[in-house]
Image: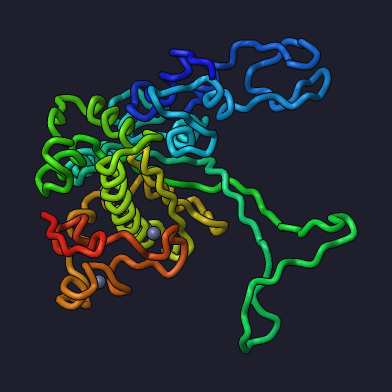
Amino acid sequence: MLISPEAKSLVMDSVTGRFEAGGSRITRRVNAKIKCKKCSHEIPRSSKFCPNCGEKQLQISEVITENTVLENITLTPDSSLVTFATLRDLERTTSAKDVVGGSGTSNPSVSVSSALPTLRMAGIEDVMLIQDFPLTTAAIGFSRLRSGPPAWLNSFPATKTTGTKIPVYTNCITSEAWMVKLCGRQIIRWLQSNSLLSEDYLKDTNFSSEEEATIWLVHRLSSETKSDDDRLLYEWIYSLLHSYSHLTLQLLGINSGLDASSLGEMLLTEALSYIIYAGESDIGGLSATFNQGLGLVADDIPDFARVCKFDPSCQKDDSGVCVGCLYTSRGCVNFNNDLSRSFLYGGQIMQNELKQNIK
Ligand SMILES: [Zn+2]
Ligand SMILES: [Zn+2]
């Protein structure tokens, strides 16, 4: 595998926010003319096909992957870090951090500017609005022929055109999404103050900059040869992100005019981030909330799910998560497992069959 220092830095620069979101900056950086591998015709790097001979060309995620080695990390096109960098780079992606820092492409709205300090206090480093979130839904079959049991998954019948292959029907659309990145330094402080990992593992982690903290975490989360502590770190951060994700999903359900059950989530653990996307019912609710209601969402985070209507039983018997608070009826990537209000507000949780108190 080739080690290209420039390509290696692209992904990390994106995750640490060293250059602005949106505007296809990565695409343009690698957009220097290349030669078609078949006919040697000179074409832009972003071309999907050669206009001269029709040969398929490598895409941006493949370009990043082809050249990237992050120490002992091998990146694949579907890895969280590449997904993060690719989505952050899309032409119409806006970052709240850029807007407030004055380097964003759009005019700073009052809502976005005032929201960032509140978000930071809640442990959120940045919120990005992805206006062209690529979404593919696939129907792989149907579960029943009549109303009663039995119900199992039946594939669609093969057609003349598919031959013996089983058809899968897909619908590719672009929708809107929020990509939220948590603050690396605050994650480390949370791990330290709750003694969730050994002192030895967390020694030398009092980083003075957010960038250093993010790099430290990203390397441990993406390492191919994970130690037991690395794996534990991954589990804690996964559950933390998942709890934040459900909280955000419910807040967007209230503030965006979209029903919470029409929203979906995606966790990018290695990039300390999660995504909430609008399904096919996209009506511009997520961009309107980003531009005009980010402050409202930020204000609600500290207390929104602090109390559940089924408390104290939810907190005592259900590890701080139930249908009355963080569960979602649809769209969860992990069937409502590995999340708890205790990760957000403190309390008791069950982790690896052990009861643990979190501050
Ligand atoms: Zn509850
Ligand atoms: Zn979920």
Residue at 38%, 46% (x, y): give it: 274
Tell me the residue at 38%/39% (across/down).
128
Q: Quadrant of the N terminus?
A: top right
Q: Residue furthest right?
A: 160
Viewport quadrant of the C terminus = bottom left
Residue 29 at x, y = what percent?
Answer: 52, 16
Front residue of this view, candidates 247 and 285 = 247
Left or right, residue 23 beside residue 34: left
Residue at the spot 35% in from the left edge and 43% down from the top edge: 180
Q: Quadrant holding ligand 2? A: bottom left
Q: Is residue 216 left or right of residue 140?
A: left
- Asked where in the image residue 323 lies, by quadrant, the reply is bottom left
Task: Classify residue 59 by image quadrant.
Answer: top right
Provide residue 140's location: percent of width, then percent of height.
Answer: 67, 62
Question: Looking at the image, is 127 positioned above or below residue 264?
Answer: above
Counting from the top left corner in percent of width and height, residue 164 is at 84, 58
* Front residue of 348 and 97: 348
Residue 282: x, y in percent? Answer: 53, 54
Q: Is residue 199 above or below residue 319?
A: above
Name the foreground residue: 43 vs 317.
317
Image colouring: rainbow
Give 315 or 163, whichever is nearer the viewer.
163
* Numbered circles on residues, count: 0
Residue ID at (71%, 11%):
35
